[in-house]
Image (spheres, rainbow, N blue to C red):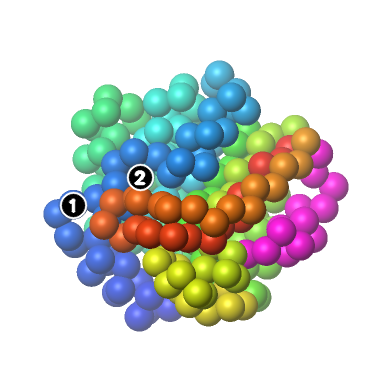
């Protein structure tokens, strides 16, 4: 699967803005998972953009791989990591075609990546599952179908939004599973603002 050129251009243009369009702090759901994180180990941040989540994971003591296809986003991720005095391993790749290493990460994090079609999502989630070590922690937050009414972020395409049932099926067999289905005011940079409908997942492989 090739990266969609229009999507690539769209993200690179968005990230050409001087400000961090989703903010410099971590996503609130990820920050709320702090107590579940190991004190050390490896983490993979999927479609990590400007690095707000990857940098925060590095600040928690983890060795972070930050994966995204946007060089403009990743240049800002590097600046953010330098500013906060941490190192992040930045990998420029398409999350639908990346060669996910097997049992390589203690933590895999996917925050707001509803750009995948159902077929692409299956490949991406299989890769994320493969990349997580046995016992490792998966953290996912994405917009749910009710977000179509709020229109405060996300693609506005029903089949690309996340449901509890869809995540349960993809990560069947995981333990310590917890779902959080919320409708809340969200303010993340200039790009996510207002009432939002989201589903969050944590579980261990
Ligand atoms: C809504 S942003 C979320 C960024 C980050 N996870 C966060 O929460 O700040 C979606 C991200 O997906 C990236 N992206 C979109 N399609 C991609 C693909 N096929 N492969 C890799 N990254 C992709 C974009 O560059 C962008 O950084």
Q: Give the residue displayed 29% in from the left and 74% down from the top.
A: 9
Q: Quadrant of the N terminus?
A: bottom right
Q: Does residue 152 appear left or right of residue 131 in this picture? A: left
Say if mark 2 contacts mark 1, CB within 8 Å: no
- Can you tell me whether the CB of the residue at mark 2 lies under 8 Å from the nearest atom of ligand 1? yes
Q: Does residue 117 appear left or right of residue 150 in this picture? A: right
Residue 19: numbered disc? 1
**Residue found farthest to the left:** 18
Residue 51: numbered disc? 2
The quadrant of the picture showing ligand 1 is bottom left
Q: Quadrant of the C terminus?
A: top right
Q: Give the residue displayed 76% in from the left and 62% down from the top.
A: 165
Residue 39, position as x, y percentages in the image: 55, 19
Residue 197, position as x, y percentages in the image: 54, 61
Q: Is residue 167 magenta?
A: yes
Near mark 1 (Cα within 10 A), the count class, few <14, some 14-19 or many ≥20, is: some
The image quarter containing residue 133 is: top right
Q: Does residue 112 appear left or right of residue 127 in this picture? A: left
Q: Element under label 1?
A: loop
- Can you tell me whether the CB of the residue at mark 1 lies under 8 Å from the nearest atom of ligand 1? no
The image quarter containing residue 109 is: top right
Q: Which residues are magenta?
A: 162-175
In this rendering, the answer to whether 37 lies above or below 123 is: above
């Amino acid at each position: 699967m090739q990266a969609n050129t229009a999507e690539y251009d769209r993200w690179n243009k968005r990230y050409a803005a001087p400000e961090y369009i989703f903010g410099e702090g971590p996503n609130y759901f990820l920050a709320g998972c702090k107590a579940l994180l190991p004190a050390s180990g490896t983490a993979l941040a999927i479609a990590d953009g400007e690095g707000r989540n990857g940098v925060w994971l590095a600040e928690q003591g983890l060795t972070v791989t930050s994966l995204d296809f946007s060089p403009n986003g990743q240049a800002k991720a590097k600046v953010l990591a330098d500013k906060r005095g941490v190192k992040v391993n930045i990998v420029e790749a398409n999350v639908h075609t990346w060669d996910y290493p097997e049992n390589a990460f203690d933590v895999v994090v996917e925050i707001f990546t509803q750009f995948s079609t159902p077929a692409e999502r299956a490949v991406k989630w299989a890769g994320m599952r493969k990349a997580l070590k046995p016992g490792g922690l998966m953290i996912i937050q994405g917009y749910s179908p009710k977000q179509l009414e709020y229109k405060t972020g996300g693609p506005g395409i029903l089949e690309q939004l996340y449901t509890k049932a869809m995540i349960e099926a993809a990560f069947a067999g995981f333990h310590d599973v917890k779902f959080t289905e919320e409708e809340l005011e969200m303010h993340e940079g200039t790009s996510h603002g207002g009432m939002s409908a989201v589903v969050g997942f944590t579980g261990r492989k």
